[in-house]
Image (cartoon, rainbow, N blue to C red):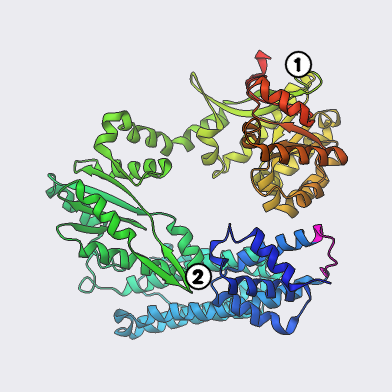
Amino acid sequence: MLEKGRIGEIIRENFTKHFSHIADKKDIELLSEAVYSLLNHKMDSLSKLGERLFLSGILLSHFFYIFEKVVSLLEGEKKNLRLENMLSAKRELAKGYIKEELKFDKHLFERYKNRKIAAESKELSEALNMHTSWIINFINSILDGTIYENSELDSWIDKTQQTEIPNLDNNTYKKINNSLKETAKRLLKAYRNGEYFYFSVLYREFMGYSSKMQNMLILNFMSEEIISIYTDYLTGLDNQFKLKKDLKKYADKYLLLIDISNFREINISYGFDTGDKILKHTAEVLKSIENCRAYRFIGDEFAVIIDSKEKSHKILKSLESMTFTINHHTISLFFYGALGKIKPNILELAEYGLIKTKKLKNHIIDLEESEKNNLAGVSLSNKDLLSINAQLKVAVASDKIVPYLQGIFDACNLSKPAKYEALMRIRFKEKTITPKEFLSILKNTYLYFEATKIMFLKCVDVIERRDIEINFNLSVLDIINQNTTKFLKTILLKKPEIAQKITFEITEEEAIENFREVKKFISDIKKLGVKIAIDDFGSGYANYSYIFNMNPDYIKIDGNLVSEILTNDKQVVFIKSLVDMCKNIGIKTVAEFVDSKEKIEKLEKLGIDYFQGFYLHKPEPCDKL
């Protein structure tokens, strides 16, 4: 029999470390009750539990993430769970949560309508009322099942969204209105499919577009007498236009550019209303500091003109003394700063400085000191970053993407690689660039999928010419992209002899976070003869139940575990237990990042099947093998 107490133990043991805001005993009890009620289909209490989850500050996306993980762990304990017809139960809980969240957002709408400018303009007040009524009615219509298909949604939008915006630029209106419509369609689809994790994220995006629309309405009615073009309407500080004007007359002073760390996550987790409060309070603190001029620059960035460098640390200290309490959770803020003497290109240098100090995890960067230490290269290197998309386009179009191969050695024969892992490189002129320098940028562009296809075709060519086996890395982006998976399957169907010599590597963390999509892909692709390796095992969840359910052929042990094999007995025990378990179910193990003979000898004793690392073979171009 499933016990509520056991669910609470699982949540306490597995999730409080990763979700610090649910460490409270009452939150754990609430989560336990919600998971228990969902598993037991207690329909009469689920809606109320959804309301309580919202009021406790627990994100709906976090709850469903925890629910899926708890189910997995309970299945691993051989618990008898009622998982059939779960969609209606999930929907009841989600509906209660979303309706309570919508009540909260109504207060946000009231904030717009109660502003002085809205109260003094009947035309603006009516426009805001029409827009907010549309938003509220739309969400309620999804929850109540009034609209179900996209065709119905289009008709419903055309009938109900009649907000008139006099004298507003049509292109601006159409752009935001289209974004609102497209997000509305995605919201409807997510709710209809029971994808409540995704729905909760889209809901906040939808409300973000609504806020933009309301801001647009307000700004459209503002006259020059109410708000100057040099004033930020939210904080009351001078804005970036005034800053650029003032910099010309303060050449003997210093500029401190300030950025709030993780501000986007605050907006997503706590709502834009909270984000606005933080921005306004930050502005108030800056106004209170003597002998400095404060500006709201862009988004969550502020600028301050000061007389001396020493004052910069005092300003950041004052800002970081702020705390906010939201739904019984305390938010503390961290700020990054870039400081430099005012000169013609100071804003550009300061922006580059902020990028650099975030990467280095520094509190504040002194641009003058950075220039002395060749961080004047900040400007140059970040200009390179800004143009990297153009360089990547050239690389894709002009065949500059090349596979480097690193040997994977059978423990029974370390003299010759048994197979190779393909690693992407880009050649710019005489320089070979590694993924560390470009992959994160590439993944945010459509070029990423083209690069995957180019790499795969080149690896297929190497297999055909050299008659070798190759491990090919796939990310979850590749797996959920239908065009990419169709491309891979088409090649493998045409060349079944190639499929037998390919192993797709997927990282453990991505495999678990996208379990259903990855498991389906693995099931489909293995039918073509391809083998599967779970990469970086032990770096994230190390969830045996999830991973082994994917039926991999290889487990690649994370390099961080291997690096400590000679000094950390706990790592030895972990690796030994993993190896023994894999041998019992027919999965081969690979130790990555092997960099010494001593580590190989230690790992051999533990029963590792394959080795990979610089000690045995460094990555090199195919033609040099």
How far across and down, in percent of the image, does residue 402 sit?
A: 61, 25
Badge 2 marks a residue whose secondary structure is helix
Query: Magenta span covers which residues?
Result: 75-83
Image disc number at residue 471? none
How far across and down, in percent of the image, does residue 447 sit?
A: 57, 39
Measured along the vertical axis of the image, is residue 420 above or below residue 66?
A: above
The residue wearing badge 2 is 207
Q: Decide if residue 556 is on the left or right side of residue 384.
A: right
The reply to whether the magenta stretch includes residue 437 is no
Image quadrant holding the N terminus, namely: bottom right
Mark 2 is on which residue type? Answer: Met
The number of numbered discs placed on residues in the rendered structure image is 2
Mark 1 is on which residue type? Answer: Lys
| Residue drawn where x is 72% and y is 23% of the image | 601
The one nearer the camera, 160 or 545, is 545
Are there few (<14), some (14-19), or many (20+) residues within 10 Å of tag 1? few
Q: Mark 2 or 1 closer to N-term? A: 2
The residue wearing badge 1 is 416
Badge 1 marks a residue whose secondary structure is loop
Inspect this view and state whether residue 199 appears. Answer: no
Measured along the vertical axis of the image, is residue 506 above or below residue 291?
A: above
How far across and down, in percent of the image, does residue 119 sit?
A: 32, 84
Inspect this view and state whether residue 127 appears. Answer: yes
Measured along the vertical axis of the image, is residue 567 above or below residue 308?
A: above
Question: Are the residues tagged 2 and 1 within 8 Å (C-beta)?
Answer: no
Residue 164's quadrant in the figure? bottom left
Examine the residues drawn in magenta and state their main secondary structure. loop
Image quadrant holding the C terminus, namely: top right
How far across and down, in percent of the image, does residue 511 sit?
A: 70, 48
Measured along the vertical axis of the image, is residue 327 above or below residue 511?
A: below
| Residue drawn where x is 63% and y is 24% of the image | 595
